[in-house]
Amino acid sequence: MEALARSLVSAVPAIAGVPLWTVTLLMMVLSAAVLLAFALTFGGLGSYVLRKVAGDIQVRIGPNRVGPYGLLQFLADGAKLLLKEDIIPAKADRFLFILAPYLVFVGSFAAFVVLPFGVGLTASDLNIGVYYVMAVTSLVVVGILMAGWASNNKWALLGGMRAAAQIVSYEIPVGMAIMPAVLIAGSLSLQDIVRSQGGLLGIFGWNLFHNPFTFFSFFLYFTAAQAETNQTPFDIPEAESELVSGYNVEYSGIRYAFFFLAEFGDMFVVAALATACFLGGWHVPFFRAEALPALWGNLLSLAVFLIKAFALVLVMMWVRWTLPRLRVDQLMRMSWKYLVPLTFVNLLGVSLWLLIFKGKGIPALIASLIG
Amino acid sequence: MTTPAEALPTQEMLINMGPQHPSTHGVLRVLLRTDGEVVVNAKPDVGYLHRALEKIGERVTYAQFMPFTDRLDYLASMNCNCAWAWAVEKLAGIEVPERAEYIRVIVAELNRISSHLIAFGSFTADMGAFTPFLYSIRERERVNDLFEEICGNRLTYNFARIGGVSADLPQGFLEKTKEFLDYFEPKIPEYNNLISYNKIFLHRLANVAVVTAEEAVAYGLTGPNLRGSGVAFDLRRDEPYSVYPKLEFNVCVGTGERGQVGDCFDRYMVRINEMRESVKILRQAIAQIPEGPVLAKVPRLFKPPAGEVYFRSECPRGETGFYVISDGTVNPYRLKIRTGSFVTMNVFEKVTKGLMIADIVAVIGSFDIILPEIDR
Amino acid sequence: MTGPADLIFYFVAALTVASAILVATLPNIIYSAVALLFSFAGVAGLYVFVSADFLAATQVLVYVGGILILILFAVFLSNRISTVKISNPVHFNWQAALLCLALFGVLSYTAVSTKFPVKPGLSYQPTTAEIGELLMTRYLLPFEVASVLLLAALIGAALLSRPEGEKERSADMEEPK
Amino acid sequence: MGLKQYIADIVEAVVTTAKGMRITARYGVDAKEEITQQYPEVRREPSERFRGFLHNDIARCTSCTMCVKVCPVDCISLEAVRGADKKMVLASYDINIGRCMYCGLCVEACPTKCLTHTSGYEKASVDRGELILHFVHEDPAEIKARVAKQVAEAAAKAAEAAKAAEAAKAAESPKMTESLRPGKAEGSIVPAAPAFAAAVGNPGGGNPGGPKAPDAAKEEWEKKG
């Protein structure tokens, strides 16, 4: 960010007199605002798409009253949530009750910072990108626990407990499943990981096709990450048919909207991480977006990245409207007995593969055989 | 030696599940004593929907009570209607035209399908899969269309009359029913593929809340809940009434397909299989139905002879029995209704010990209770 | 980049210290835990300032995502924990005060007397690779010992949390064959 | 749990999930499967036997009170007076559709088939009084007064005629001077009406809620139906 600010200052003579840090700060605020706008829009449109997908699958139509094809439904929902009475239960812990939604939202939103949206489109390309995402999403747990406890509602408390247990135990398989991509790229930076998947023709540079283990890694990651973000069929913290609505049962109005947005934000983060780590990120198949002029390259890669990520989000919705929910002990068992061992085996396999074949994937090996 | 767990006793948590809860299928209150997620004790508290139907029955005439049986089990009004009619006919010794009996069986079996569809759909919705619920509603709507054609209402049918049915079948009804059966039959394997044999679903149900055959009999369970425990008892076959003896069908029982006999999955599968059997019965009934009148001559001011009668019939939620005492006037002297769901609640506390909160939902769903029937 | 960076540093440091004080003094133990959250976050921020981004993320992941959750779990699951008298009774012990003072003296002395090596031009270099390499080579033994210790703790916890008299219940939850 | 079982479990989970997802995907993609009707714009035709709101064609009604007697929930209230020609004249005929359970017993009982189910089913209202359908739009008191007047006139006429006849017959039997009893015909036949009207919060049971509003509402639903 600072380097960018420096180049900007040197490029535009009009702002040469402004201190560098002011420009940096302004740019930080600006990129945060852009990301926030994206997250909010995604949350809104995501809810629309979710309902449309639900409608399609359930032989219904879905929202179609507000605006053309119901496209403005999310604005109506947003307005409704804003205008709704904000109810705080009389015996709730007011301070924590108010704090919790923000914490949850911050935890989910902070992950957007490192997502590689395009060739040069990253708010901050941290060199510990993947690790950072894992770290900040753990903030969500604290928020959820707080929400559950502060509501002074036993169902909410149960939901909070479930959420915490679930997120903590699924952090391990998520981390382990994403490791192969890190191993291949030799870096934790998401941009580096994406760049490592260039080369080779078309989609075969993707980590997904690097070797059999990474192929499975993708599915393991996708499963575990859905669980970590409380998506159906792992939505036991919300479980509307058991816990009514879990940790957010007492929330209303805009505070509820924060939970809601955080959920959709998480959805996108999961899809984006899977895209970046396994599906070639912003790489355009059969085309080198980096070679284009900066503006067009960025736009093209942004579009490709979003298409891939949205496709994954769609798959998540599809799963959501198909599967029943696991029970809490089965969920734990699935993590500890299935996902954790499998991801470890997978990691071992990838490591061995990289050791034996000197870091080359199957497509690269075939290519070297031919050429 | 005391283990740390004994030295530091944890306190159990009391949770109210209901009366307002999405998965209690109405206003059922279950008082849960839980140790974390594990339910130590689940005590059902019924009565929030009590409408004194039995007392109403003593106030109104025999014919007037018919609409109230709609409200007994609103998902299977036809069955309850017919059960009441059969009970009163047995009391008064009225001969019912055969065509009327066939019509009753047709609507009752159609209603059994639609009721089991709701049981299936709401159960899967309880399990977290919302989509099968809407599929089941889609099918049920077609049954409702048929019912609307035959009696004019979509939920509270009030179709049977003492001595027959209120109206003959409308033009083309049997063809439409056949059409529906052809449409519906392939949907059952689709449900099975969609969710019944889904691994998650199986894990949620298999071996959960096992009611053994002895327990089921001892607690007086009836209907699919009893058959789910492996007891092949079906009033349509074992205590035949109406034209059921002329129809061929199997009595579906729980087989312990994926766990022990009598678990939630068995009860669930019994309902799925019974829909198939109902289709079979319907096809036969449509083929056999004779021409003729549909209503016996019953005086408008109907006064059955003094006496008492108990009649029970196989409803989708178990045995629905009417115990009627007549003193020879236009009103019953005393009316007692036995319903399947109410009896099922007895065994609820026993089988839910040691389950988890999510299982309670599964148990309620697998018993397929309906609150108006419990509270009457 | 002196002015604003320093300002942010002082802000983060103040946040850390202030929340740490709150952790100790707040009457409600749950608020203490929340204050701890901010304290941890502040420490992570301080790590960022010394260019230890890996450590900062680890701080958040382990302390916020792990330790704090555990503390919250323990607090929430304990009976009547929010009653101040049970959770955070205020006792003044002169022994404790003495001990604290002594400790404070020692720490202050150490802080003042130690000559910290100050690198003039601190460059923000990624440290992750270096940490990884060191863990796998020079500090391999401590690393492995620590993991064995953790494994032992894990097994112990699993054993403890499984009382004997619950055979029936666990049989109930066995998977279907 | 052996390794074989372990792997079989995983495979089963994946396969069954894939099966389910194939089905949902098929419905998701196939737009023909959508069965939702856009209600206010698209309406399904109610069937011929549809039991909607009740309608009484009062021109044909004989005030026999069969419907009132047969109704299990007492939602029909009827007031009639005996007219001059010995036929019953309806003073008021109200059906509380907020109470009606659409069982259709009254329609079946109606001997002249003047009471029928319409196909109307839309009548949301913020006032419970509006849920009472009035089929006689005049003030019952007026009708009663008018009928009483007619009866009285008839009685007077009859009395005159009787007097004339008496005068003619006076020579033979002078003691028959008794007239008809006009007071008796005025009694209402249905005592239940005020009670239920009070229950729905419209004291008086008649028109104090404004005779216009229910009429307009009725016309509306009739138009819709």
Image (cartoon, coloured by chain):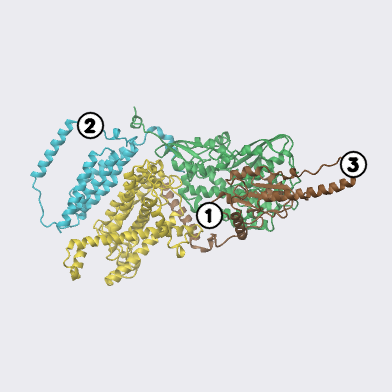
Chain colours: A yellow, B green, C cyan, D brown
The amino acid marked with disc number 1 is Tyr
Residue D196 versus residue D17 in the image, above or below = above
Q: Are marks 1 and 2 in contact (CB under 8 Å)?
A: no
Image disc number at residue C91: 2
Image disc number at residue D173: 3
Image disc number at residue C56: none
The amino acid marked with disc number 3 is Ser
- Residue at the disc numbered 1: B135
Q: Residue at x 40, y 54 (%)?
A: A83
Q: Quadrant of the N terminus of chain A?
A: bottom left
x, y (%) of residue A22?
19, 61
Q: What element does badge 1 sit on?
A: helix
Distance CA(mark 1)–CA(mark 2): 65 Å
Distance CA(mark 1)–CA(mark 3): 87 Å
x, y (%) of residue C163?
37, 34
Q: Residues within 10 Å of mark 2 (few under 14, many from 20)?
A: few
Give residue B305's quadrant in the image: top right
Give residue A292's quadrant in the image: bottom left
Q: Are marks 2 and 3 in contact (CB under 8 Å)?
A: no
On screen, residue B160 versus residue A194, left or right, reads right
Q: What element does badge 2 sit on?
A: loop
The chain under label 2 reads: C
Is any part of residue C46 visible from this angle? no
Q: Are marks 1 and 3 in contact (CB under 8 Å)?
A: no
Q: What element does badge 3 sit on?
A: loop
The amino acid marked with disc number 2 is His
Q: Quadrant of the C terminus of chain A?
A: bottom left
